[in-house]
Amino acid sequence: MTLTTPATTPAAQPSRQARRAQARQAARAAARSTPQTQTGRLTEQILEAAAAQAAAAAQAASLAKAHLAEAEVQAWLHDIDARLAVIFAHPEQNLGHIEEQLARSVKEPLRWLAQRAAQVQANAVACQCPQCQGPLTQQKCLARTIHSRFGPLTLWRGYGWCARCGQWHFPADYALGLGQAQLVLLLADGALWIWNLAQDRFPDARQRLDLFHAEEHLWAVAHDLYGRGTPEAQAWVAPLLQQLRDDQTVAVIASLAELKPRLREAQQKKVQTPIEYFEHNAPRMKYKEVLEARKACEAGQATEPQRQLANHPVGSGAIESACRQYQCRFKRTGQFWTTPGDEALLGLETLWRNGRWDQLYPHAKSSAALN
């Protein structure tokens, strides 16, 4: 038995007149899309976006209670049942899998609750200046997204202009702890480019010269004058080190300047380097208050302000050490990183080094010997 297939007829090509008609229709359609029409459409999109933002702001402002709607609760419970059903279908999965799935299922409801609770607290804050308590004028509303432990939270906060302070203020940010830090401390080794960068990025930060870098400049002079590790070098540098810790930078500079004329030309140049270093960084060399607070804590006689002040660093060694440890892990031979991959492993490395691996894997047996 022979099967035959009917011959296929090639599709008819449009005639020249039909093609011209199609071209005229396309030209008319393009002509209708004039710049005025495009501007009108853009205006409509802007107005629609503004209306949507106004509706979201109004809904947020009316929120008076943080809770989940019944439909949201039911959806959450249904999600938990589905996750547990998958686990029950696989007997090899253990308590660790149950904990992981429950933690994942609860994250989104907790994000909703956190966002609504924060919005309720923001709505309860009076729109007045948090500094002088004066009224704010030109009051408006603006959204802000905060990255929390549960995920991104979008909050609408009122803000306004304080004529007395001459600044715009978001009072709700202060109430929620989202305002600027009361104190920003910036530690550096004295390099000019660091201070320039700090002035540009953190103009209101308190700058402090690393105490141990400052002491190294004095030790360098002592070793050059009396030899490395000699008793004479230690005897000469000891009172200058104490003056540094007592915030007597001017006295240190005067001692070095008095010493300079009695030295050979080569040694004068070496002494001039710390003189210029201390003169440039003198306003940043304030250590006495912190060091005295630490002594008071050791003696058990510290006040509450002193206990807080004792935690302020006077050196950048801890940060430099942490940077080195991370570099040893992430700058090995042949390693190349994408930004997402680098940041993901950075989080894992931080958990491991801080002894918090069990928070990620509760049933894993972590041991420093395995690193």
Image (cartoon, rainbow, N blue to C red):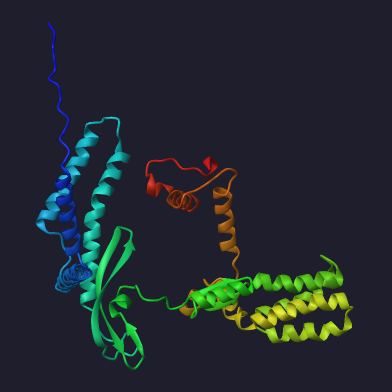
Q: Residue furthest front?
A: 16
Q: Hey, which quadrant is residue 143 in on the image?
A: bottom left
In the rendered image, residue 146, in percent from the top left (x then y), is placed at: 32, 66
Residue found at x 30% / y 35%: 94
Residue found at x 32% / y 93%: 163
Camera-nearest residue between 363 and 170: 170
Q: Please say if 48 is above or below 78.
A: below
Residue found at x 30% / y 44%: 100
In the rendered image, residue 300, in percent from the top left (x then y), is placed at: 53, 73
Q: Residue furthest bottom?
A: 164
In the rendered image, residue 132, in percent from the top left (x then y), is placed at: 33, 90
Q: Residue furthest top?
A: 1
Looking at the image, residue 305 sits to the left or right of residue 169; the answer is: right
Looking at the image, residue 167 sits to the left or right of residue 341; the answer is: left
Looking at the image, residue 56 sits to the left or right of residue 269; the answer is: left
Looking at the image, residue 252 sits to the left or right of residue 311; the answer is: right
In the rendered image, residue 35, in percent from the top left (x then y), is placed at: 23, 69
Residue found at x 66% / y 81%: 280
Camera-nearest residue between 97 and 297: 97
